[in-house]
Image (cartoon, rainbow, N blue to C red):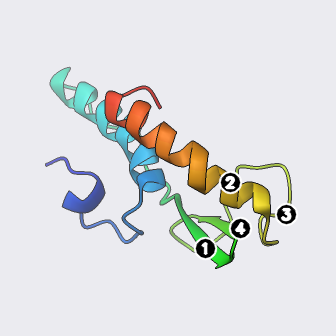
Amino acid sequence: MFALGDASNLPTSKTGAAIRKQAPVLVANLLAAMAGRPGEAAYDGYTSCPLVTGYGRLVLAEFDYDGNPAETFPFDQAKERRSMYLLKKYALPQMYWHGMLRGRA
């Protein structure tokens, strides 16, 4: 049985960031199953929660199944930043609508 995102029972947040990391694992394991091989790809529980802390400020919380930080940017993401707010407001919707839904991101 294969599932991802909201259709799965994974112990992680149901976010676009999580499904973006789940999809390649699902595809790899589905292709392996179709070829008669065992699926070896594994999802580490990565998810991301953009936490708006004030007008124009945001903390981008990224973590794995165990709650360990899984930051993808080269700076301290525990600090609220305007740049992360702008990412959420402008870049992430574009990535979702024009990238993820079309299988490009």
- Cα separation between marks 1 and 4: 11 Å
Q: Is residue 83 left or right of residue 8?
A: right
Name the outermost residue toward the left.
Answer: 1
Q: Quadrant of residue 9?
A: bottom left
What residue is pinned by disc 3?
Answer: 76
Mark on residue 51? 1
Q: Secondary structure at mark 2?
A: helix
Name the outermost residue toward the right.
Answer: 75
Mark on residue 56? 4
Q: Secondary structure at mark 3?
A: loop
Circle 1: residue type = Leu
- Cα separation between marks 1 and 2: 12 Å
What residue is pinned by disc 2?
Answer: 86
Residue name at image x 42 percent, y 53 percent: 16
Residue name at image x 34 percent, y 28 percent: 102
**Label 4: few (<14), some (14–19) or many (≥20) C-alpha neighbours in 10 Å:** some
Name the outermost residue toward the top.
Answer: 35
Dots 1, 2 in contact, CB < 8 A: no
- Cα separation between marks 4 and 2: 8 Å
Dots 1, 4 in contact, CB < 8 A: no
Residue name at image x 36 percent, y 28 percent: 103
- Cα separation between marks 3 and 4: 18 Å
**Label 1: few (<14), some (14–19) or many (≥20) C-alpha neighbours in 10 Å:** some
Q: Nearer the viewer, residue 7 or 57?
A: 57
Circle 2: residue type = Leu
